[in-house]
Image: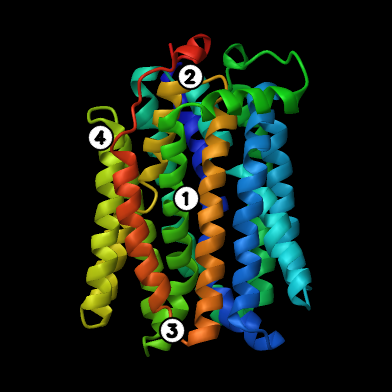
Amino acid sequence: MMRSRLSLLLLASGVILSLAMGIRHGFGFFMAPITGEHGWGREAFALALGLQNLVWGVAQPFSGAIADRRGPARVLLIGALCYAAGLLLMTVSATPWQFSLSAGVLIGFALSCTTYSVIFGVIARTVPTARRSRAMGIASAAGSFGQFALVPVERSLIDAMGWIPALVLLAGAIALCAPLAKTIGHLDDPAQRPPETGRLLPKMAATFAQAWRERSFRLLMAGYFVCGFQVVFIGVHLPVYLRDKGMSGSVASLALALIGLFNVFGSFCAGEWGSRIPKPRLLSGLYLARSVIIALFLLCPLSSWSVALFAASIGFLWLATVPLTNGIIASQFGVGHLGLLSGAVFFAHQAGSFLGVWLGGWVFDATGSYDIVWIGAILLGVMASLANLPIREEPVASFAGERPS
């Protein structure tokens, strides 16, 4: 595609990903004021965000498949509007089940429409194979930049105005993504979409079953489960973990901002390295490095410097899995069903996310400590490292008609 069209696609995609990913990464700062005002335990808040991640994962294959077959414009538009509605409804959710419906179900569905599987499907269909890994790395970096830019903003809004006005302003910001949906829809290449023959659900089931027979696909899902467990547990519970240890709110804000900042570099580098080094090998090293970093963080004396070093290190590896994982799927199965298969793998990620965020709240309420979950994150990282080593990214023969060109 022409350079100007590629630049416009990456710019529009980057804005949507920055807002969608950036806003959700700051939800940890809302835990203390919301639970304090309503008198809830941390498990109630954590359960809602765990449900958010689970719904996101369940809905993602469907959102991706619809975008694959009928284009991304309507999917992105509906997602932006649902996201804004969910944020507004959070302000009037007076019970845990109401909060679970707004912050959990509605925003979880919205995220399935506005994040990586849908965006990467467009990129894969429109960007030449030689430049695809780099383009995915740039898009991942945009989502990371949103975390870096918006997390401090969210905390500042809460401190200056209170959590309700902060959510209202964030709802207005995400609604601005709606006009960009049409732009991305015009840039998508309809010639690369699978034919709309047959009913959607049977076609989805058959495509997934065909992919599931591949051992590499199953191992990729297992690794992505661990990714979700680690990053969402850390993203949601790190601010209150640091507060429990006597650290100031500014240290927690800096930590999440540094995760976002170094995530920009890590995502971009992963996209670059993925075009030169076997992606399964990179993923294996990444998961092992995460376990080492978490272990060192727990073993070293806690200080503002150790928090900053941990945030920068784990941030570099935060979403580096995204371009690598999606690149492997495109190499194995082609681009025609990338939204569906990427969404299916992402479901495993979100199942891990649900377990990580909910287990963090449940374990803390039961024991007064996060130690068990931290140790679990270390052990799971080692297992994910081993699972990714035997993955092969060669094209799958049964998907020969969908291989990248």
**Can see residue 70?**
yes
Q: CA distance from mark 1 to mark 4?
A: 23 Å
Quarter placement of the C terminus? top left
Query: What residue did someone put label 1 on?
Result: 225
- First in residue order: circle 3 vs circle 2: 2
Q: Nearer the viewer, mark 2 or mark 4?
A: 2
Dot 1 or dot 4, earlier in sequence: 1
The Cα atoms of the two marked residues, 3 and 1, are separated by: 23 Å
- Pair 1/2: label in front: 1
Which circle's residue, 1 or 2, is located before the other in the chain?
A: 1
Q: Earlier in the sequence, mark 3 or mark 4?
A: 4
Which label was assigned to residue 273? 4
Q: Which residue is mark 2?
A: 334
Residue 282 at what x, y percent from top left? 26, 40
Residue 317 seen: no
Q: Name which of mark 3 and mark 1 comes first in the sequence.
A: 1
Q: Is residue 96 above or below residue 291?
A: below
Q: Are marks 1 and 2 in contact (CB under 8 Å)?
A: no
Q: In terms of depth relative to the viewer, which is nearer, 195 or 156?
A: 195
Name the residue that disc number 3 marks.
369
